[in-house]
Image: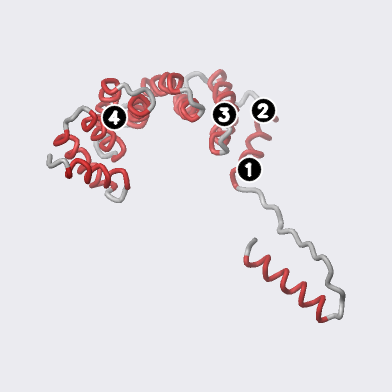
């Protein structure tokens, strides 16, 4: 209950007592406010209802459903958006996210690969990283993950997530000295990340 509501209740009680009234059972419920995500969900759902053939509305509804944790519904909306606009690679990227969160890594990789093929150079690193991340953490495909994380770094070498993942892959392969170098690069961009800090301590403890 908010501080403001506590003040309101206190003032009501004081007013009743000061007026000589009988204070029996006092039920004061705080106002039920909707979150910004709920409001966005209502807004996009309303737009889709009015114009179901609008791909952008459906895609935004899908992304909002991801934020709500309703992954299967998000998949339906994003697939509907892509049926309307099959060339929208940003929708493919979001659909990949929904698939992964829904526990469907193979479908996630498929969507990320389609998006990766359509993004222009200089903007491919995110989907290349996402593919590598799924392959490494969900599919345990070290070689496949290595291929895509290297693609991500080649497209943009300043992304700490990719450098950190590259270090993890190298560490998994037993290449601790090389892994340390990648962790150090990642730390240059995000040295406060707990994972990066733990990784550096781990490989340095191994006296690489």
Across and down, in percent, residue 95 comes to 49, 26
Question: Residue 74 has which mark?
Answer: 3
Outermost residue on the right side: it is 21
Question: Residue 183 has which mark?
Answer: none
- Whether tag 2 and tag 4 are in contact, CB under 8 A, the answer is no
Residue 76 vs residue 184, the one in the foreground: 184
- The image quadrant where one finds the N terminus is bottom right
Question: Helix, strand, or loop for circle 3?
Answer: helix
Q: Distance between the residues labelled 3 and 4?
A: 26 Å
Query: Which badge, 3 or 4, is on the more N-terminal residue?
Result: 3
Q: Is residue 148 left or right of residue 93?
A: left
Question: Helix, strand, or loop for circle 1?
Answer: helix
Q: In this view, does 132 lie to the left or right of 14?
A: left
- The image quadrant where one finds the C terminus is top left
Question: Helix, strand, or loop for circle 2?
Answer: loop
Find disc 1 in the rendering and name its residue: 38
Question: Residue 152 has which mark?
Answer: 4
Q: Which residue is drawn at 27% across and 38% down?
A: 164
Q: How far apart are marks 2 and 1 (CA)?
A: 20 Å
Instruction: Characterize the local packing of mark 1: few (<14), some (14-19) or many (20 or more) Cα atoms within 10 angstroms.
Output: some
Across and down, in percent, residue 49 comes to 69, 29
Question: Residue 51 has which mark?
Answer: 2
Query: Which badge, 2 or 4, is on the more N-terminal residue?
Result: 2
Query: Which badge, 2 or 3, is on the more N-terminal residue?
Result: 2
For residue 141, which quarter of the picture? top left
Q: Residue at x 53, y 21 (%)?
A: 82
Question: Helix, strand, or loop for circle 4?
Answer: helix
- Whether tag 1 and tag 3 are in contact, CB under 8 A, the answer is no
- Whether tag 3 and tag 4 are in contact, CB under 8 A, the answer is no
For residue 42, which quarter of the picture? top right
Colour scheme in the image? secondary structure
């Amino acid at each position: 209950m908010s501080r403001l509501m506590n003040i309101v209740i206190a003032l009501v009680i004081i007013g009743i007592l000061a007026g000589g009234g009988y204070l029996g059972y006092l039920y004061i419920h705080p106002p039920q406010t909707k979150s910004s995500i709920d409001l966005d969900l209502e807004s996009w759902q309303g737009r889709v209802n009015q114009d179901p053939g609008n791909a952008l509305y459906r895609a935004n509804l899908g992304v909002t459903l991801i934020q709500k944790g309703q992954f299967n519904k998000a998949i339906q909306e994003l697939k509907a958006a892509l049926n309307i606009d099959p060339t929208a690679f940003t929708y493919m990227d979001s659909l990949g996210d929904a698939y992964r969160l829904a526990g469907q890594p193979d479908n996630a990789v498929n969507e990320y690969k389609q998006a990766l093929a359509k993004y222009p150079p200089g903007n491919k690193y995110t989907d290349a990283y996402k593919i590598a991340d799924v392959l490494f953490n969900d599919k345990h495909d070290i070689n496949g993950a290595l291929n895509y994380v290297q693609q991500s770094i080649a497209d943009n070498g300043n992304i700490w997530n990719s450098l950190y993942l590259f270090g993890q892959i190298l560490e998994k392969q037993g290449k601790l000295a090389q892994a340390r170098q990648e962790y150090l690069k990642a730390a240059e961009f995000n040295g406060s990340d707990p994972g990066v800090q733990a990784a550096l301590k781990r490989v340095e403890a191994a006296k690489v």
